Image (cartoon, grey):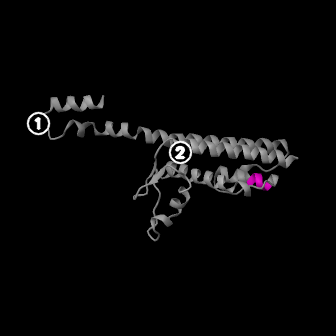
Amino acid sequence: KIELKIQDWDNKNPNHEYSGFDIHEGNFLELINFESKTLQAGILILHSEVENNLKYVCNSVGQEKGKTLKPKDISGQGIIDKCKKYLEQEFNIDFSSKQEPWDKLSAYNRLRNIITHQDGQISLEQTKTFEQNGDVIKLSKIQNIKIDSDGFVHILNNEVIFDFLRISEQLLNDCCELLDNAEN
């Protein structure tokens, strides 16, 4: 449809200083960016679900066991971090054997924050090389993303979403299993 609009403009305005592409460039760019926006939305929705499910697990088991503290009462950075600390503190859960998936979940958490709060662009520190930048290091745990020289994070394909889903599901199951074992 965009191509037809471009051709139609060019046919009706053969001597105009702007081409049909110039006039309809915004429509074309929106079409190209649709997949990228969809992948970003997938990260945001999945992250929200992970937070909600983890918080639900913590609050439910806390209520069942008569705990007075809730994850929101724990100091930490974000819901996921607070829930992890809550489970460690209140139920003596040891996540040391699960550190790699937690680190990866933390990387996805950072990706979500970059998309949400920084329009998909990391702040590059002038005093460090690109590879030494904290966000570059953290996001390197996620495959199928690329950070360009301006600091924009690009999600390359939907495998990022599926990886995030697998990690999240694994950690939620691990939390439930560790809680079950802690009761015994």
Residue 58 placement, left or right of 145: right
Give the number of the disc on residue 15: 1
- On the image, the x and y values in percent for residue 153 come to 46, 52
Q: Is the magenta stretch mostly helix, strand or loop?
A: helix
Residue 58 placement, left or right of 7: right
Q: Residue visible at 48% across and 43% down? A: 157
Residue 132 placement, left or right of 17: right
Considering the numbered disc 1 on the image, is that residue within a helix, a strand or a loop?
loop
- On the image, the x and y values in percent for residue 7 come to 21, 30
Magenta region includes residue 12: no
Q: Quadrant of residue 65?
A: top right
- On the image, the x and y values in percent for residue 75 come to 70, 57
Q: Which amino acid does label 1 sit on?
A: Asn
Q: Residue visible at 23% across and 40% down? A: 22
Q: Which amino acid does label 2 sit on?
A: Val
Label 2, residues with CA under 10 Å away: few <14, some 14-19, many ≥20: many
Q: Residue visible at 48% across and 64% down? A: 131
Residue with the mark numbered 2: 160
User: What range of the chain is rendered magenta?
Assistant: 85-89
Q: Residue visible at 53% across and 43% down? A: 159
Residue 112 placement, left or right of 6: right
The residue closer to the viewer here, 179 or 99, is 99
